[in-house]
Image (cartoon, rainbow, N blue to C red):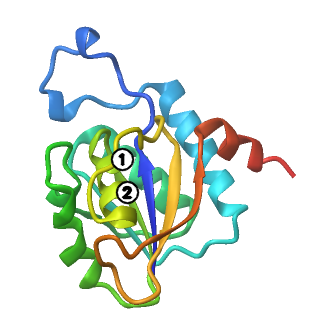
Amino acid sequence: MDCLLFRHGIAVEREDWDGQEAERPLTRKGAEKARDAAVGLRRLDIAPTHVLSSPLTRALETAKLVGELFRLADVKVCDELLPDAPPDKLFPLLASLPEDACVICVGHEPHLGLAAGVMLFGRPAPGLSLKKAGACCIRFDDGPKAGKGALWWWLTPDQLRRLRKP
């Protein structure tokens, strides 16, 4: 299984948003940059089979952009990708998918960085974090288990956007 952790794009600033925090959307620029980063993902010769997303609006908007680019109509909303969800709660969700799945999980920091640490080292590791619209790929050869993932790549949004150009 390949598990891609993808952080949502740039959202409207908290102080500029009058609505509920969970409904804070991407900015126009944030949506464009997230889409450009997702186009870069396509150049990495990956074939996602599933897109999972936090229920928060900014993550769900990002996940839908990713899903459209990879022609995956169904984005599954998962509380396991909420910002305050325990990172180890992702494992049962991932284990419920086919062993050969390529899953894109769209979420938030610090949750995604903590989840990457648990996947790679069996525990959260300080210093792991994804920039907005950045992504990493963690490969599991024998099913998703804590400490059993191998880092395949870790890319900034700028690197992903540069990949989109031929």
Work out whether 153 lies above or below 1: above
Q: Residue at x 23, y 66 (%)?
A: 90
Give whichever of 149, 41 is nearer the camera: 149
Give whichever of 105, 68 is nearer the camera: 105
Query: What secondary structure is found at the residue carrying circle 1?
Result: helix
Disc 2 crowd, CA 10 A, few/some/many (<14, 14-19, 20+): many
Q: Which residue is mark 2?
A: 116
Work out whether 53 lies above or below 9: below
Q: Is residue 60 visible?
A: no
Q: Which residue is mark 1?
A: 113
- Where is residue 37? Give x, y as percent: 61, 45
Disc 1 crowd, CA 10 A, few/some/many (<14, 14-19, 20+): many
Dots 1 and 2: beta carbons under 8 Å? yes
Residue most toward the right?
166
Q: In which quadrant is the N terminus drawn?
A: bottom left
Q: Residue at x 62, y 72 (%)?
A: 46
Q: Residue at x 35, y 55 (%)?
A: 117
- Where is residue 47? Give x, y as percent: 58, 76
Work out whether 146 lies above or below 29: below
For the residues labelled 1 and 2, the Cα–Cα distance comes to 5 Å
Query: What secondary structure is found at the residue carrying circle 2?
Result: helix
- Where is residue 146? Give x, y as percent: 28, 72
- Where is residue 148? Give x, y as percent: 38, 76
Query: In the rendered view, does 51 fall on the left or right side of 76?
Result: right
